[in-house]
Amino acid sequence: MSVIQGTITDYQTVTHVTGRIVGEVGGSVSSSHIATFQINEQIVQLRGVAPAGLVNGDVVRVTGQCNSSGIFEAVYYINRTRKCHSPPPQFGTSRFLIKAFLIIGIVILLGCLAVDWIIYSDDNGTDLLDLISSNIPAGLLAGLFLVIGLREKNRIKAVEHGYHEFIGGT
């Protein structure tokens, strides 16, 4: 991520609507707002769920990165002229899914251990190595759920930390 700052010129905005209507009551429609402007001759594009608080002549600081077309795709902005900034990132559904992944991983892992304990404790001559090898697929599945959940949790923390560092670092 890099940061650019300067005065906005050639500000334009569009609303991008997607979705479909099925019958008279079904379907879904969503919209996003795309602002395109220039800072120091660099074309900047900012997408959001709400219109950006920007106009021509505003002094801004934006963070993001250039795409393959050379357009700087902004993630966050601070408008120094109007004393406002982009809203914080929203992760409501992602947080729920992370918790679900972690809980599923723990339940699978504990289930494997409980099954092993029950079978091994019956003392029918079951070999511990047989029990462990029979639980390898479930153990791998549990590990996969745990790794994905922890990775996404750390990704969200990093994004939130980056946002707060950017907003607080002015």
Image (cartoon, helix red, strand yellow):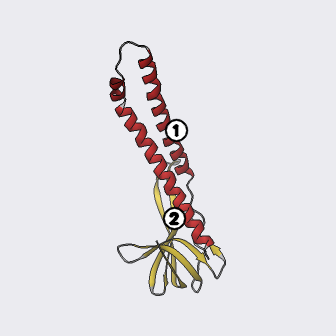
Near mark 2 (Cα within 10 A), the count class, few <14, some 14-19 or many ≥20, is some
What number is the disc on residue 32? 2
Horizontally, residue 131 falls left or right of residue 98, namely left
Q: What is the x, y in percent for residue 96? A: 55, 46
Q: What is the x, y in percent for residue 157? A: 54, 57
Residue type at mark 1 is Ile
Does residue 50 show up? no
Q: Is residue 76 above or below residue 11?
A: above
Which residue shows up at 65% across the image and 74% down it?
A: 84
Q: What is the x, y in percent for residue 55? A: 58, 81
Q: What is the x, y in percent for residue 119? A: 42, 18
| Quadrant in the picture for residue 90 | bottom right
**Of the image marks 1 and 2, the number of the one nearer the N terminus:** 2
Horizontally, residue 130 falls left or right of residue 50, namely left
Residue that sits furthest to the right in the current view: 83
Distance in Å between CA atoms under marks 1 and 2 = 33 Å
Q: Is residue 13 above or below residue 143?
A: below
Residue corresponding to mark 1: 103
Which residue shows up at 43% across the image and 28% down it?
A: 112
Residue type at mark 2 is Ser
Q: Nearer the viewer, residue 24 or 126?
A: 126
Q: Is residue 119 above or below residue 161?
A: above
